[in-house]
Image: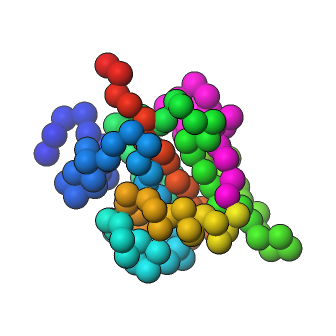
Amino acid sequence: MLKGIPKILSPELLKVLCEMGHADRIVISDGNFPAESVGKDSIVVRLDGHGVPEVLDAILQVFPLDTYVDHPVNLMKVMKGDPVETPIWNVYSYILKQHDDRGSDMIGHIERFAFYEEAKKAYAIVTTGESALYANIMLQKGVVTS
């Protein structure tokens, strides 16, 4: 065990986060995301017993977000005509504000199938047991300055 590291961050996930460089991306996915097929060329880390918000909060304690792009955080857009509500996005905004002064201004939205294509290029996908729909979030790593 280590001091100051959120317990939810497994040794495998910590290794992945350390290996990532500036502009590399990581997806934290809900339980419905096809992580194994989309991530066949990426590292897939399973955290099935956890939800996206708790994983997001833990990762952001050790992971800088990119300051060189407008949207270092991207969500999967709801498909047109899909009657799904996304209250979890408000939770994400709250968590992001706790870790970065840009808050919800740094959040972008990517069309569902384009999100899958971008996720294929991610360094890693963390798949969770999150049951909320459209709960997938992609983070782009920044640099550690201090």
Is residue 95 in view from this perspective? yes
Residue 142 position within the rendered picture, expressed as x and y whole percent measured from the top left: 43, 35
Is residue 128 in view from this perspective? no
The image quarter in which residue 39 lies: bottom left
Q: Residue 105, relative to residue 134: is it above or below?
A: above
In magenta segment, residue 23: no
Q: Residue 139, relative to residue 33: is it above or below?
A: above
In magenta segment, residue 109: yes
Q: How many labels does the image show?
A: 0
The image quarter in which residue 61 lies: top left
Foreground of the two, 84 or 37: 37
Quarter of the C terminus within the rendering? top left
Residue 3 position within the rendered picture, expressed as x and y whole percent measured from the top left: 19, 35
Residue 97 position within the rendered picture, expressed as x and y whole percent measured from the top left: 58, 32
The image quarter in which residue 110 lies: bottom right
Foreground of the two, 88 or 105: 105
Quarter of the N terminus within the rendering? top left
Residue 108 position within the rendered picture, expressed as x and y whole percent measured from the top left: 67, 47
From the viewer's perspective, tell me whether residue 6 is left or right of residue 93: left
Q: Which residue is drawn at 54% across and 62% down?
A: 118
Q: Which residue is drawn at 22% across and 58% down?
A: 12
From the viewer's perspective, tell me whether residue 43 is left or right of residue 11: right
**The magenta segment:** 94-110
From the viewer's perspective, tell me whether residue 93 is left or right of residue 122: right
Q: Residue at x 49, y 77 (%)?
A: 34
Q: Which residue is drawn at 26% across and 39% down?
A: 5
